[in-house]
Amino acid sequence: MALSWHDPGMTMPISESWTRIESWLDVHAPRTFAALEPPAERSAIAAAEQAIGQPFPEPLTESLLRHDGTGDYDLLPPFWQLLSVRHIVKAWQLRMKIYGAELAGAEEGDLDGDYGPWWHALWVPFAADGGGDYLIIDQRPYRRRGRVGDADHETGCSFGSHPMWSSLPALLDATATALETGEAVGGYLPVAVDETELDWEIM
């Protein structure tokens, strides 16, 4: 019997979550399925890591080796498109250009808190909403390293309390489970628009 994302400590591997997501999209949202990019090249990932001065988190690398982004189509609830390797670098460099000067000497604050600074050099963006906001993987060295944050360009970064935001594997696992069951996850319900595209309704 398959494990579900909410089983404590038993999050599905990235590859299995992607297989489940692909299977659902192929049947219920073929346009979104067709938009999934082919795997990224390892050389491109290595060059991107050099450009941002840090290695990608292992789950992100594994995901990119499956699909180098989702084009202009939303995949993650409620409106997030996965970035390609090239766009990860562009997003990180843009945020560093905007906020880099503010990072020098800035106080870290409560690393375990629900809110972070506007930006941090050790955040790796991996998804975007098309409006200037990004989902990031927090790579700061602390006990919750790897959790997912919402780096809003107007209000700063926030970290959700729902378990699906604890890591990229948890987020992909939760997404796959929501698609398969048709049930809401974290307040977001998956729907197939015109039986061709994936969308999410906010409950």
Image (cartoon, rainbow, N blue to C red):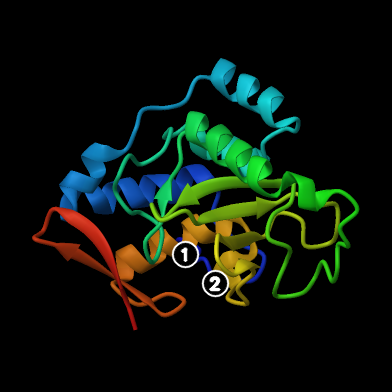
Looking at the picture, how far across and down is residue 42, in whole percent?
56, 20
Name the residue that disc number 2 marks. 6
Element at badge 2?
Answer: loop
Looking at the picture, how far across and down is residue 98, in whole percent?
64, 46
Picture quarter containing residue 93? top right
Q: Is residue 27 above or below residue 78?
A: above
Closer to the chain start, of discs 2 and 1, is 2
Residue shown at the point (37%, 68%) measured from the top left: 178
Looking at the picture, how far across and down is residue 80, in whole percent?
41, 56
Image check: 170 left or right of 74?
Answer: right
Query: Badge 2: how crowded within 10 Å, few (<14), some, or many (20+)?
Result: some
Q: Are marks 2 and 1 in contact (CB under 8 Å)?
A: yes
Q: Rounded to the nearest whole Å, what is the CA distance between mark 2 and mark 1?
A: 8 Å
Residue shown at the point (31%, 46%) measured from the top left: 22
Element at badge 1?
Answer: helix
Looking at the picture, how far across and down is residue 36, in whole percent?
31, 38
Name the residue that disc number 1 marks. 174
Camera-nearest residue between 47 and 188 = 47
Q: Residue 110: give its label.
A: none
Image check: 15 left or right of 103?
Answer: left
Camera-nearest residue between 71 and 195 = 71
Camera-nearest residue between 14 and 156 = 156
User: As shown in the figure, which amino acid type bears the numbered disc 2?
Assistant: His
Camera-nearest residue between 58 and 160 = 160
Query: Badge 1: how crowded within 10 Å, few (<14), some, or many (20+)?
Result: many
Which of the image's four quarters has the N terminus? bottom left
User: As shown in the figure, which amino acid type bears the numbered disc 1?
Assistant: Ala
Picture quarter containing residue 142? bottom right
Which of the image's four quarters has the C terminus? bottom left
Of labels 2 and 1, the one closer to you: 1
Tally of numbered tags:
2
